[in-house]
Image (spheres, rainbow, N blue to C red):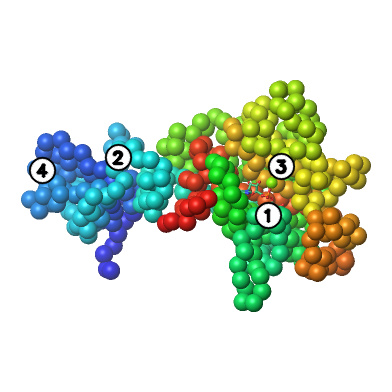
Amino acid sequence: MSRSLCTIREAGKRTGETVTIGCWLHRVRSSGKIRFLQLRDGTGYIQGVVARSEVSDEVWEASGKLTQESSLYVTGQVRTDERSKSGYELTVTGIELIQLASDYPITPKEHGVDFLMDHRHLWIRAPRQRAILVIRAEIIRAIQRFFDERGFTLVDPPILTPSSCEGTTNLFHTKYFDEDAFLTQSGQLYMEAAAMALGKVYSFGPTFRAEKSKTRRHLIEFWMIEPEMAFVGHEENLKVQEQFVEHIVQSVLVHCRPELELLGRDIAKLEKVKAPFPRITYDEAVRFLQENGHAFEWGEDFGAPHETAIAEHYEKPVFITHYPTAIKAFYMKPDPNRPEVALCADLIAPEGYGEIIGGSQRIDDPVLMQQRFREHELSEEAYQWYLDLRRYGTVPHSGFGLGLERTVAWICGLEHVRETIPFPRLLYRLYP
Ligand code: 4AD
Ligand code: MG
């Protein structure tokens, strides 16, 4: 197409000029001889003003027919306008309709969640949903910038795997020709191999958990960022995490302020997210829960209400460290002074958003690793390659995994993770 188009975002820098924008009609408001078109093109929103006295009959008629989500090319002069949110509007001189949309299902009235989820492919056009996806993209950019600037190498672990990383109960099974295969739960084991080759590495990719949990924090398919660092112990692992999370939140505050405001996010709460973060041990957390009326025994794992009770005491994310080895993954290094607990930490977000990071120092001793395979009934044969990492030049190393969607939910202040990913895969929901 030879037509030269301008985006709504660019239009702001071209006041006084006549531009053509490819867009959709979001809403229209009429007041006698003037029509206000709320137009959107993905980069933003602009109000197009059509004045009866200033346009041809064709343009006036076309503007009167427009329905929600009709697609069009609109031409007009960009003018600064103090009253509009963006600071500029468009004095419309031409309208070229692409398609008149009829009966767009998502109207300005309230819709139920199931209805919206069935129409997720259209729902993402809504201003709130757009804002969330813009913030999600900024978070991803911030993540990559953080690690790229600190000398980490991006490494992509496989998605089809022969064995499990986080336990066998929630694996998605599939056939790999004649063999059995599983969709990855975590790239960690491969990232450990990569750390032995490249030093500091990180991955960013989809992970899958066949969890029969229907909560506001669980997705079946979610994206994880998994850094892994050679010659790094537990203490330094936590330092990287708090700087990392601070960097993500502060980047969103710098680059996505209009989107946060549109979502009604309490920005003052995010501004407090600066390293260092508070730390408590699992033992302290258990004592705290017991003293506050929770029936909780040492050795149990925290559920969402426990995490929320603990997090409520802090304005920043809080690390819970040194969980019992028995309730954590097989690869976590036991504390040398107290082997019944592991050199690990979960990072719990404030405001009830729950665990956003799980991480640990890894076992580096081949003998202990073999013992863990037996205790966890993992086939030593399947993990020979993983044992090789401890056989040939083993070193202390640590890493962690940040769940992207829970991070987006927290930063955006959302009720449920289903809105944090373009097309959520939830329990019993695979459509659209
Ligand atoms: O705590 P998890 O299971 O840790 C791991 O997978 C480690 N192998 C990571 C590592 O050390 N490289 O998962 C890490 C994070 C959680 O803290 C949470 O934020 C997110 O992934 N997560 C989920 N997010 C959405 N839906 C689910 N079902 C999730 N399960 C975990
Ligand atoms: Mg975890």
Instruction: Tell me the residue at 7%/50% (across/down).
Output: 57
Instruction: Tell me the residue at 60%/55% (across/down).
Output: 210
Residue holding disc 4: 52
SS for callout 2: loop
SS for callout 1: loop
Q: Earlier in the sequence, mark 2 or mark 4?
A: 4
Q: Amino acid at mark 3?
A: Asp
Q: Amino acid at mark 2?
A: Pro
Q: Nearer the viewer, mark 4 or mark 1?
A: 1
Q: Which of the two residues, 332 or 138, is positioned nearer the viewer here? A: 332
Would residue 283 be visible to someone looking at this image?
yes
Callout 4 crowding tier (Cα within 10 Å): few <14, some 14–19, many ≥20: some
194 over 427 or under it: above or below: below
SS for callout 4: helix
Q: Amino acid at mark 4?
A: Arg
Instruction: Tell me the residue at 22%/58% (across/down).
Output: 99
Give me the C-alpha separation between circle 4 and circle 1: 66 Å
Give me the C-alpha separation between circle 3 and circle 4: 62 Å
Q: Position of residue 188 (x, y in %)?
A: 71, 58
Give me the C-alpha separation between circle 3 and circle 1: 21 Å
Q: Which of the two residues, 273 or 320, is positioned nearer the viewer here? A: 320
Instruction: Tell me the residue at 90%/41% (across/down).
Output: 338
175 over 396 or under it: above or below: below
Q: Earlier in the sequence, mark 2 or mark 1?
A: 2
Q: Earlier in the sequence, mark 3 or mark 4?
A: 4
Give me the C-alpha separation between circle 2 and circle 4: 26 Å
Q: Nearer the viewer, mark 2 or mark 4?
A: 2
The CB of the residue at mark 3 lies under 8 Å from ligand 2: yes
Residue 346 disc label: 3
Q: Is residue 118 left or right of residue 345?
A: left
Callout 1 crowding tier (Cα within 10 Å): few <14, some 14–19, many ≥20: few
